[in-house]
Image (cartoon, coloured by chain):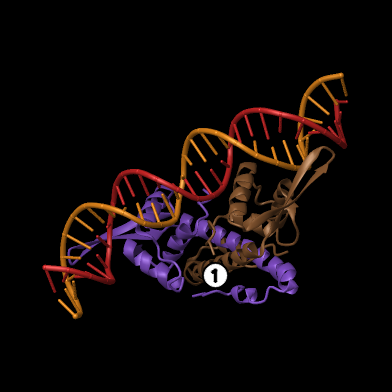
Chain colours: A purple, B brown, C red, D orange
Amino acid sequence: MKPLGRTEPVFLILTALIDEPRHGYGIVQEVRRITDSRVDLRIGTLYGALTRLSEDGLVEAHRDEVENGRLRRYYRLTDAGAAVLAAEASRMAADAAVAISRLKKFTMPTGHAGLDTKLDTNGGAI
Amino acid sequence: MKPLGRTEPVFLILTALIDEPRHGYGIVQEVRRITDSRVDLRIGTLYGALTRLSEDGLVEAHRDEVENGRLRRYYRLTDAGAAVLAAEASRMAADAAVAISRLKKFTMPTGHAGLDTKLDTNGGAI
DNA sequence: GCTCATATATCGCGAGCCGATATATCTTCT
DNA sequence: AGAAGATATATCGGCTCGCGATATATGAGC
């Protein structure tokens, strides 16, 4: 199983495809939604990533639709893609947990007031 | 505040420096320890990252020691570095939480047994 | 008619990870 | 004594990848 590039855009593209197949622009919108408008996926990033993910078998072209003259190419997450994403999510959660735990332990007591507002472990879970 | 490259190596370097100043090789060892030997930081990655992080003011050269003819250059995390790391950790935790939540909701029920073993939210928190 | 949202796709620059390489000391095993 | 491995620093070049720029086309709203 190829380890995946470890970058946020790719991670969020796979995450957006968990529940159902989506077309390119639909992925952009879903990523914006699940990140609470924090991440605006760049169009150049998206299609480059989709090409690579398809080659690696993590996503696959599902179907093409033509709606009012506009082409819609749907992509779906493969089982391999879901497995890689799960491993990646686990890794990220572990890394974040270590950093947050250490920050609380060593940085907070010495007077970095206000920093704790950023330590929101739960995030915008959907 | 510069957003930071969003890559795991840089994130772990900053994390390793939270508790106390460390020299290059000490960072490699600490990263190996806090990731439970999962991440073996590459030497080329390390020094390139330290140069960039110094230029951005997220870490700074603390002191140079000579121990048995071997030079040790210590780096420490700056307040700016701690702030950036906290923001980054928060972002990662949020992303991971969304992915894990969605994977549980949509992927697990349809028969991807065994996948849940990877969904360890707590990770190796230290 | 103009602008904005929707929808796809490609090219090139810059940033960054990492393998390879170079150099030097100390300890451990044969 | 010699080899190997851990400790310790640093640089260079290739490859990957994010993203800004660019191109193209339809429908809605002003």
Q: Is residue A91 visible?
A: yes
Query: Is B95 displayed left or right of B29 in the figure?
Result: left
- Residue D30: which quarter of the image? bottom left
Q: Measuring 71% from the left and 72% from the top, which residue is drawn there?
A: A108
Is residue B102 shown above or below A10? below
- Residue A19's x, y, as percent? 42, 68
**A83 vs B53, nearest the viewer:** B53
Residue B9: tell me if it is visible.
no
Image coordinates for residue C21, horizontal then vertical, percent: 62, 28
Q: Position of residue A103 (x, y in %)?
A: 69, 67
Left or right placement of residue D27 versus residue A44 in this view = left
Q: Residue at (74%, 62%) from the top-left corner? A: B19
Protein chain holding label 1: B
Label 1 crowd bin: few (<14), some (14–19), many (20+), radius 10 Å:
many
Q: Nearer the viewer, residue A22 or A97?
A: A97
Depicted A105 relative to depicted D10: above or below: below
Q: Nearer the viewer, residue B73 or A74?
A: B73
Rendered residue at 62%/67% (across/down): B83
**Label 1: which residue?**
B94
With respect to residue B53, does A41 lie above or below? Answer: below
Looking at this view, is B16 or A75 the one in front?
A: B16
Q: Is residue A125 above or below residue B112?
A: below
Task: Give the residue type that dot 1 points to.
Answer: Ala
